[in-house]
Image (cartoon, rainbow, N blue to C red):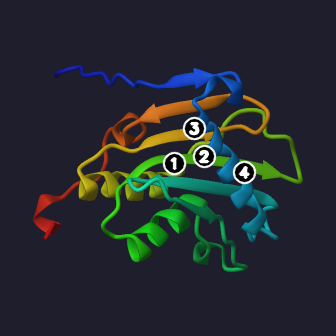
Amino acid sequence: MDQKNFVVSYQTFKSLNELSASDQELCLKAEEALKSSYSPYSNFKVGAALKLSNKQIVLGSNQENVAYPSGLCAERVALFTVGAAYPDLAVQTMAITAKSSNFVIQKPITSCGACLQVMAEFEQRQKQEIEVLFYCIGGEIIKVKGIKNLLPFVFVEERLER
């Protein structure tokens, strides 16, 4: 038997003021994306903002449906928008935030496994890591470079690739 360990690398910031101007802007854009969230069932709004290689920002928000599996997370809404509208541009940085009318969010929320898998495939396609900011409004921010720090056992099957 071999024992192996993962090292996860990330940074934490106490507030937006500690971030670069560019990262602050992206977090505020993710907060802006909350306005278009359609979340009448969970009352849990999620917003994502993606900065592309040409510095354009693409927003996404969670979209629920009464048939829960039919909804989609903010991260995938934004990423699939990039894939459809800007297929030749790389995603450099993502900011993700949330708010709820049912409770106070006291720490940054992180992406679900399905979103992490989509993020990982974007990295593969563009051959460039994505920097991710998990932003708690009025609180802490977690900054991660590269999805492997979030999903070390990412699903990859080279025989399925083009």
For marks 4 and 2 on the same chain, the one whose residue lies earlier in the sequence: 2
Q: Are marks 2 and 3 in contact (CB under 8 Å)?
A: yes
- What amino acid is labelled 3 in the image? Asp
Disc 1: which residue: 94
Residue 62 lies, in percent from the top left, at 65, 65
Disc 4/disc 2 C-alpha distance (Å): 9 Å
Q: Are marks 2 and 1 in contact (CB under 8 Å)?
A: yes
Residue 85 in percent (x, y) is at 43, 75
Q: Residue furthest left?
A: 159
The secondary element bearing badge 1 is classed as strand
Dot 2 amino acid type? Leu
Label 3 secondary element = helix
Image disc number at residue 23: 3
Work out how far the residue at label 4 is from the one at label 3, CA to CA, in angstroms: 12 Å
Q: Residue at x 57, y 38 (%)?
A: 23
Nearer-N-terminus badge (4/3): 3
**Mark 2 → mark 1, Cα distance in angstroms:** 7 Å
Q: Could you tell which of marks 4 and 1 lies nearer the N-terminus?
A: 4
**Which-is-in-front pick, marks 4 and 3?**
3
Q: Is residue 104 left or right of residue 132?
A: right
**66 vs 43, nearest the viewer:** 43
Disc 2/disc 3 C-alpha distance (Å):
5 Å
Crowdedness of circle 2 by 10 Å Cα count: few (<14), some, many (20+)? Answer: many
Mark 4, residue position: 31
Q: Residues within 10 Å of mark 4 (few under 14, many from 20)?
A: many
Find residue 41 and name its label: none
Q: What residue type is labelled 1?
A: Met
Which tag is nearer the camera, tag 4 or tag 2?
2
Establish if 15 lies above or below 96. above
